[in-house]
Image (spheres, helix red, strand yellow):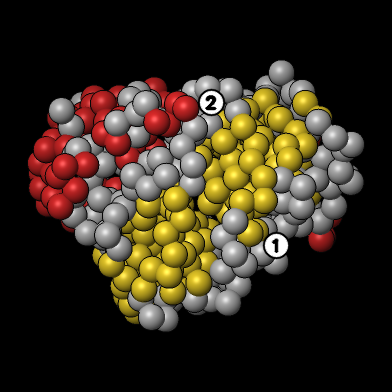
Amino acid sequence: MPRRLQRLTRILAAAGLTAAGLTTTSLTAAPRASAAAGGLRDVLVVGNSQAGTVSVIDGHTFANLGSINVIPDLSQRMLEIYVNPIWLAGYETVRAVEGGDRYVDDATVSPDGRTLYVSRGNLDDVAAFDLTTHAELWHSRLDGFHADHAALSPDGTRYVVSATTAQEAEVFDTATGGVAGTFATGTYPHQNDYSADGKYIYNSSIGITSLPKALEWAKGSFLLTKVDATTLKVVQTWTFPHGIRPNEIAPDGHTFYADQSYLNGFVKYDLNTSQILNTVQMPFASGGTTLSPDNYPQNSAHHGLALNGDGSKLCDVGTIDDYTAIVSTSNLTTAGTVTYPANALPYWGQTSADGQYCFVSLSKLGEVSVIDYATATEVARVPVGAFPQRERISQMAPDAVSALSPAAG
């Protein structure tokens, strides 16, 4: 707490400057039933940001299995914010920038399928829940005023969360909720990912999103930061010309694909040479052409990127364009496009456990679109809760699935 209090005034000043039903619609034959090692069930967990819930979708049949409320303590958390003038000012500033309450930023499940970890956005904390009793096991507040994207270590012992306005990522001990350490990031840290072997953490930053494009020079540093997962020491950084949005590292370990702020498409980057190899400009849809860059949602034209199982295809989510494109990585050409109703706000892409499908959250429709990489067609549409954003592949124990609320989200 002392470390946090010493920093709150500085962080608030920076934030202040920037403020001014369970039905799956199947479109093709249903895939095979869910199966996973050790009796666990492959699932997709979907954070419903406005609802404060997490929906659980079967990873193979795409059925909505139910949901869990992840803000049962909302009244207590809000009381703590209201009686602390600094926290309240920060909360109101972030809420204004976000366009309202965003209670769930990210969520995932422990390797044993029994504990849910949630980065709780505007509440600026992380919480853990028992998936069979739904009891809150612990919650911990972050530095700054917003808890952002998160990543669970492969062994399930550490949960890394970006503290957006504090210019750092915090690493939590999943057993206790205590802070195991922190590491420095670029301005407004965003996405976190562990390498497949668990040795490294990759964090990307987006800069101060509420400044206009004309002041991009003042948004801060746009960094991809590679960190030793054990020591939390920075190993290497790469500087990008724009905010780094959803991104993926290819199976070769050095080809990096990323959406960038204001770019209606994505870049292909070589981590070995620190060079952008290709900038892929995707076509604007009619809705996208009418928007000024300053009206892009949080600076994002495209906000969602995923690689299929063998790395041969990208799922590129056109946020302002209301489409998802499947792109071949060999020649960066579009294999097919799935379009959505106007203002659907597709906002995240996640590949299925078997590598064959891309799940796309449609934030303003309260749905998840399921796209077949092989055919570049939508095979299902799944109702979830209000304003779905981040989705994560996980596994759940059978009794945890049985304990879910029947509500879709």
Q: Is residue 43 left or right of residue 287?
A: right
Which sits earlier in the primary sequence, circle 2 or circle 1? 1
Q: Position of residue 340 (x, y in %)?
A: 60, 28
Q: Residues within 10 Å of mark 1 (few under 14, many from 20)?
A: some
Task: Please tell me which residue is depicted at 29% across the width and 31% down the height of the picture.
Answer: 292
Locate residue 170: give its quadrant. bottom left
Please indicate, yes or no, whether residue 122 appears anywhere in the rendered image: no
**On the image, numbered disc 2 is attached to which residue?**
344
Please say if the residues under marks 2 and 1 sit with CB atoms less than 8 Å apart: no
Query: What's the distance in space between the residues labelled 2 and 1, CA to CA?
Result: 27 Å
State the quadrant of the C terminus.
top right
Q: Amino acid at mark 1?
A: Gly
**On the image, numbered disc 1 is attached to which residue?**
309
Reply above or below: 329 against 388: below
Q: Secondary structure at mark 1?
A: loop
Reply above or below: 386 against 296: above
Q: Secondary structure at mark 2?
A: loop
Task: Please tell me which residue is depicted at 31% across the width and 72% down the height of the picture.
Answer: 237
Q: Position of residue 294 (x, y in %)?
A: 26, 34
Residue furthest top in the image: 21
Please indicate, yes or no, whether residue 22 appears anywhere in the rendered image: yes
Q: Residues within 10 Å of mark 2 (few under 14, many from 20)?
A: many
Q: Position of residue 283 (x, y in %)?
A: 49, 42
Reply above or below: 107 against 345: below
Q: Nearer the viewer, residue 307 or 32?
A: 307
Task: Please tell me which residue is depicted at 71% across the width and 45% down the height of the picture.
Answer: 376
Q: Amino acid at mark 2?
A: Ala
